[in-house]
Image (cartoon, helix red, strand yellow):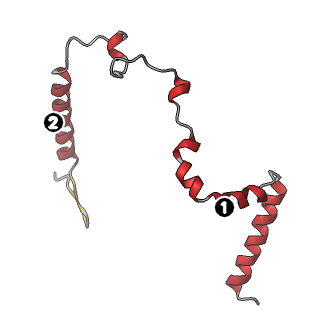
Amino acid sequence: MNFTLLSPSGFWDPVLWLIFLILFGIIGYIIYSRGNPSYKPNTEQVKPYLSGNAEPSKEKITVRAGDIYWGFIEAMNGYYDALKRMHTGDLRDYILWYLGIGAIILFILVGGV
């Protein structure tokens, strides 16, 4: 019985895929088994190496989103200032903007009928 499924983009042979899966599993196990036998979990070995320095507290190494996007925010500062002035925090204002822009788009699409 032939289990090969032919398709426009190739073929699917489940037996061949199982053979590859087993083969790659064996290769992975061989690599894993050749690891360093002196490794001991839950010791000093699991700490990150920071050139002999003590690990800083989490508050000192946390990267805030404002730090990541600093250059982008600085470049777009004028645009963001206008958006901050428009931001009221009232849900009704956002619904009004949504309906108003939707009405304008609908008017443009329909052609001013």
Residue nearest the observer in this picture, 34 or 52: 52
Residue 31 place in picture, x, y as percent: 17, 27
Left or right: 78 in relation to 10: right
Q: Which residue is mark 1?
A: 78
Residue 7 place in picture, x, y as percent: 25, 64
Question: What residue is rendered at 56% in x and 25% in y?
Answer: 59
Question: What residue is rendered at 29% in x and 10% in y?
Answer: 40
Task: Find numbered disc 2 in the image and state the secondary structure of the residue it sits on.
Answer: helix
Location of the C terminus (image quadrant): bottom right
Q: Which label lies toward us, 1 or 2?
A: 1
Residue nearest the observer in this picture, 54 or 44: 54
Q: Earlier in the sequence, mark 1 or mark 2?
A: 2
Mark 1: which amino acid?
Gly
Residue nearest the observer in this picture, 13 or 31: 31
Q: Are marks 1 and 2 in contact (CB under 8 Å)?
A: no
Left or right: 88 in relation to 69: right
Residue 60, disc: none
Question: What residue is rendered at 21% in x and 38% in y?
Answer: 21
Residue 23, disc: 2
Residue nearest the observer in this picture, 42 or 16: 42
**Alpha carbon separation for disc pair 1 and 2:** 58 Å
Left or right: 55 in relation to 67: left
